[in-house]
Image: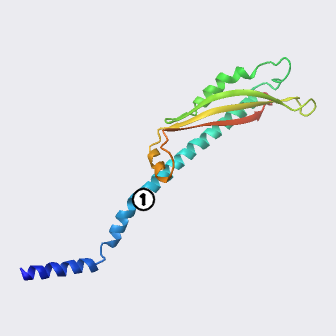
Amino acid sequence: MRNLMHHIRKACQRFRRAEDGAAIIEFAILLPIILVTFALIAEGGRLFWAYQNAITGVRDVARYFGRVAPSDLCATTPSATIGSFQAAAAAELAALSKPGVTVSINALTLECVGTAGDYRVSPAPVAVLSADLTIANLPFAPLFQLVGGTALTQIDTTITDRSRVFGP
């Protein structure tokens, strides 16, 4: 019995002095923090990518209408109205939607800027496209609570772009 106690005491001292598994223990302690950080970076990158794609799409659709809409939109008797292009804008923006990311038209309006003589066509028509962006299905949303955010189920924002109408 005395030998057994001496052996246990020696094993405990050896265990206390040994540092063979310290690196694996430190790694096991830091692994959850590393995984959470990686998940936040991946989710933030996905959100940024979706937002940038929507901005690019809205800008492209606004430029498209600057080329296809007639330049006499601000005239007293225009050949068309900006409302004539609303359905086409809605279709173009719907094509930007992906699973979890929805882009829908909010408004397509017309601004007549400038005074007579300022531009080739005075006042100059400017198409203003406003779209709603909804990013849903955020898989790592609860992790944002760990860094002081709120648990978001979806992100909603509005993107606006304007383009001068030059006409066909």
- Front-most of 161 and 16? 16
Q: Is residue 124 above or below residue 4?
A: above
Q: Is residue 11 above or below residue 91?
A: below
Reading the image, the residue beneath label 1 is: 33
Q: Which quadrant of the figure has residue 103?
A: top right
- Residue 157 position within the rendered picture, expressed as x and y whole percent measured from the top left: 60, 37
Q: Which quadrant of the figure has residue 31?
A: bottom left
Secondary element at tag 1:
helix
Q: Residue at x 64, y 28 (%)?
A: 106
- Front-most of 27 and 97? 27
> Label 1: how many residues lie within 10 Å, few (<14), some (14-19) or many (20+)?
few
Q: Residue at x 19, y 78 (%)?
A: 11
Residue 62 is left or right of residue 115, and the answer is left
| Colour theme | rainbow
Residue 164 is left or right of residue 3, and the answer is right
Residue 10 is left or right of residue 65, and the answer is left
For the view shown, which residue lies furthest in the left direction?
A: 1
Q: Residue at x 67, y 23 (%)?
A: 86
Tally the marks: 1
Q: Residue at x 75, y 30 (%)?
A: 127
- Residue 14 position within the rendered picture, expressed as x and y whole percent measured from the top left: 23, 80
Q: Quadrant of the N terminus?
A: bottom left
Which amino acid lies under the numbered mark 1 shown in the image of this protein? Answer: Ile
Q: Quadrant of the C terminus?
A: top right
Residue 138 is left or right of residue 49, and the answer is left
- Residue 8 position within the rendered picture, expressed as x and y whole percent measured from the top left: 15, 78
Q: Is residue 3 above or below residue 141?
A: below
- Residue 156 position within the rendered picture, expressed as x and y whole percent measured from the top left: 57, 37
